Image (cartoon, grey):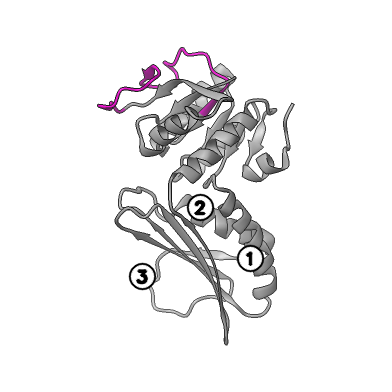
């Protein structure tokens, strides 16, 4: 059985994953890590940091916050633990550190763990390759609950990056049009963020042409979709070789020993 550490165990996703793991015969959580205390008693020991964690483990699942990622990367490198990194809102410096750390340990970094979102990325690559030459503008609107800290979402950026990569990096991203009055650029992706209520996650990509509009949308109705994806990723990554992976590698079975 695969042994996992849940980093960010007292958060919404940490608790969700702990609950889902109980129903999975192939994986167990041997410890949790969270700097914040919880009134809910966990079924496993909880440590204040990954460096302080002494539990036996094969892989770490992370749903925490950007401030905790630097210490997490250092501890996983020292302990030689594969890391499923789901925290978003990382700085450019942190992203470079993730790339450097992946030369020593397996890291799976995903802005969104759902199968639907990863399929959507493939659909968007096809769509943009056809619609951009035809003069269509691209806009992304993402909606999340009022407790989400980063904006735009990591998933919205990942969707934009997928299209930009397909088009040889021609796009520039625009996050705020209130600071200057001008027409949108031809090679521009506008990204807007909505925060309110308990919206789990909605991402809509709009292709707006002169006479028609095409929309590709994904709606998550439960956080369980992200938790299930993270668990499958952890089971796959536990036997992977060092490198930087994403969910497409899990689906393809790339990189395993």
- Front residue of this view, candidates 23 and 207: 23
Q: Point out the tag, 3 or 1, that comes first from the N-terminus.
A: 1
Q: Position of residue 113 (x, y in %)?
A: 54, 44
Disc 3/disc 1 C-alpha distance (Å):
23 Å
Q: Secondary structure at mark 2?
A: helix
Q: Is residue 40 magenta?
A: yes
The residue that mark 2 highlights is 155
Disc 3/disc 2 C-alpha distance (Å):
25 Å
Where 187 sits versus 236, above or below? below
Q: Point out the tag, 1 or 2, that comes first from the N-terminus.
A: 2
Q: Secondary structure at mark 3?
A: loop
Residue located at (30% from left, 58% from top): 196
Disc 1/disc 2 C-alpha distance (Å):
20 Å
Q: Position of residue 231 (x, y in %)?
A: 54, 34
Which mark's residue is nearer the viewer, 1 or 2? 2
Q: In the visual, does 56 lie left or right of 195?
A: right
Quadrant of the image containing the C terminus: top right
Quadrant of the image containing the N terminus: top right
Q: How many neighbours does mark 1 have within 10 angstroms: few (below 14), some (14-19), or many (20 or more)?
A: few
Q: In the visual, does 212 lie left or right of 131?
A: left
Q: How would you classify the magenta stretch by its main secondary structure?
A: loop
Q: Give the quadrant of residue 197.
A: bottom left
Residue that extends furthest to the bottom in the rendered view of this protein: 211
The residue that mark 3 highlights is 179
Q: Secondary structure at mark 1?
A: loop
The magenta segment is 36-60
């Amino acid at each position: 059985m695969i042994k996992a550490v849940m980093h960010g165990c007292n958060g919404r996703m940490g608790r969700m994953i702990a609950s889902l793991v109980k129903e999975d015969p192939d994986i167990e959580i041997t410890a949790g890590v969270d700097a914040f205390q919880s009134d809910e008693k966990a079924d496993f020991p909880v440590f204040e940091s990954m460096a302080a964690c002494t539990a036996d483990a094969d892989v770490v699942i992370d749903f925490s916050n950007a401030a905790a990622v630097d210490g997490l990367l250092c501890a996983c490198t020292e302990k030689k633990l594969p890391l499923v990194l789901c925290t978003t809102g990382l700085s450019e410096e942190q992203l470079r550190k993730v790339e450097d750390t992946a030369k020593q340990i397996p890291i799976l970094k995903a802005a969104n763990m759902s199968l639907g979102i990863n399929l959507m990325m493939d659909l968007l690559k096809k769509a943009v390759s056809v619609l951009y030459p035809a003069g269509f503008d691209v806009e992304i609107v993402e909606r999340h609950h009022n407790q989400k800290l980063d904006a735009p979402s990591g998933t919205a950026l990942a969707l934009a990056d997928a299209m930009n990569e397909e088009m040889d990096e021609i796009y520039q991203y625009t996050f705020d049009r209130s600071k200057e009055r001008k027409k949108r650029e031809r090679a521009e992706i506008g990204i807007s963020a909505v925060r309110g209520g308990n919206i789990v996650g909605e991402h809509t990509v709009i292709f707006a042409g002169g006479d028609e509009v095409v929309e590709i949308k994904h709606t998550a109705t439960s956080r369980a979709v992200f938790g299930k994806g993270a668990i499958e990723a952890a089971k796959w990554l536990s036997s992977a070789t060092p490198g930087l992976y994403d969910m497409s590698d899990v689906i393809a079975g790339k990189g395993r020993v």
